Image (spheres, rainbow, N blue to C red):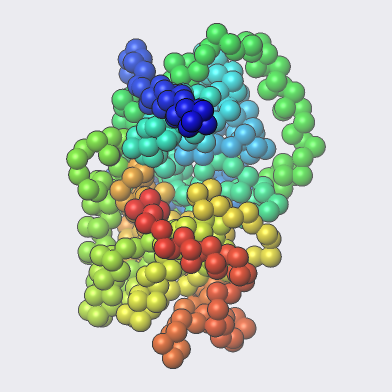
Amino acid sequence: MLKNKYILLLCYVFAFIVSGCASKVDFAPLEKQYKFNPPTDTSLANYINSQKKPNLTGIKALSDGIDAFIARLAMIDSAQKSIDLQYYIYRNDETGKILTLFLYNAAERGVRVRILLDDLTTANHDDGLLAVANHPNISIRLFNPSYERQYRGLAFLSDFGRMNHRMHNKSLTIDNLVTIVGGRNIGGEYFSANENVEFGDLDVLAVGEAVDEVSNQFDIYWNSEQVQSIQQLADANELNSDLEMLKVKAAEFEATLTQGEYVKRLENSSLIERLKNKTLDWYWGEAHVVFDPPNKLEQGREDGILLDDLAFFFNQTQHKLLIVSPYFVPGDEATNGLISAVKEGKKITIVTNSLAATDVLAVHAGYQQYRQKLVEGGVKIYEVRGDATEKKSSWKGSSKTSLHAKTFVIDEEIIFVGSFNFDPRSALINTEMGLVIENAQFAQDILNGIAITADEKAYELSIEEGDLVWLDNLNDKVIYAEPGAGFWRKFMADFLSLLPIESQL
């Protein structure tokens, strides 16, 4: 009897804690802030204005991790008026610290810096965020934050419907003149700075017409009801760091930079000289930003604006559709739609991760239920190989896979590059964004790069005697079981496929 009373007491305590975590805190409204008009008399402005074509957008692909990081640093270093940064993940590793240093130096020059982060991965970083936000020219806001800063796990359980809704958008815009949009977050694995994981990813550096659209998208999120400032959320009174201490720490970190191996690799990037000499080659074409609204889940609809836009472009496919997505869980409706497109004479190709390459086993569990039907229906599927590096498995979705690029190419002319994965989470739960670009040469170059990946770094799926097989075209081999994946990974993927979790993948 005593034991039962003790258990009951624990249940009451747990319920009390959970109910406290779920309660919403009423904050004072944040100050509305908006984009600045682009400067006209800076070095960056003079260069871009000399290149611009009326009503068009110039695009430069950033597929190499080192180049993608260099481009961000160079952009921040050239800023004169404003920096708007929006990311799902911003790691406090070497790349994150370097980027923060550049942002701090820009703020010291008088540049307004707005940092908008999803709150999911900021746990235990409130003090650091507060220290940076202590600078008068830096503001930090968090999307859909946990009101309980210490016991986030309980808060997530008690307020799952809201907390499950994350901002997956990724953009960096300088002076409303130039922007980077794509699949990369901020962290070593995205910029060739992680010894264990190398992500194959894609961003685009853009100038011209679409930049203002990215800025408008940022303003909508920045001023939305879904964001709060770090000062409102954390206890600023407990902050032991002042502005002078921030300056000291920035100077100390900057003094150590030249000693690092990664910095030496950055210095050897060929992109540095092209940026200095302003000899970048641009693809020019019409481009538009597509994005979900920040209140996506509150609109009472089953899909978001971005999904509608992508469906519109997909339905325009006349001949060929390429889908590159690290997480590919099409569901019955999209599976049948892709097979129907093949029956109409269209060529459909999908590039995604193999079981050995992904560390998000639940996503693979969702995907593996559809791939044989797709292949039997005439859809070409390539699975990117896993490498020799041992990766930590995570069914919760830590996003560490060999392939991380999210791009679609329609009829060798229309290209989407952004944050959208072809899965239920991107379609229905998280907010996403991307650029839709019309340029046949850019599309062809993307296709050529994917073709090399498919031939040299991926398996082609096929059917032999009613079973799925993997074709190693590089070595002219046929593999009859999940290549590179051990028993445990196969077992876990099969087990997870039995759980009713597809809507969350």
Residue 502 lies, with reference to residue 104, above or below; the image says: below
Residue 415 coordinates in the image, percent (x, y): 36, 59
Kindly indicate the quadrant of the structure image that contains residue 386: bottom right
Q: Is residue 182 left or right of residue 102?
A: left
Q: Is residue 485 left or right of residue 376?
A: right
The residue under the point 28% across, 35% down is: 295
Give the residue furthest to the left: 300
Q: Nearer the viewer, residue 494 or 308?
A: 494
Residue 309 coordinates in the image, percent (x, y): 25, 52
The residue under the point 75% across, 23% down is: 252
Give the residue furthest to the right: 259
Residue 342 coordinates in the image, percent (x, y): 28, 78
Q: Is residue 4 left or right of residue 144?
A: right
Q: Nearer the viewer, residue 278 or 371?
A: 371
The residue under the point 65% across, 37% down is: 93
Give the residue furthest to the top: 237
One can see residue 349 in this view? no
Residue 185 coordinates in the image, percent (x, y): 52, 43
The residue under the point 59% across, 55% down is: 393
One can see residue 343 in this view? yes
Q: Nearer the viewer, residue 247 or 92?
A: 92
Residue 428 lies, with reference to residue 381, above or below; the image says: above
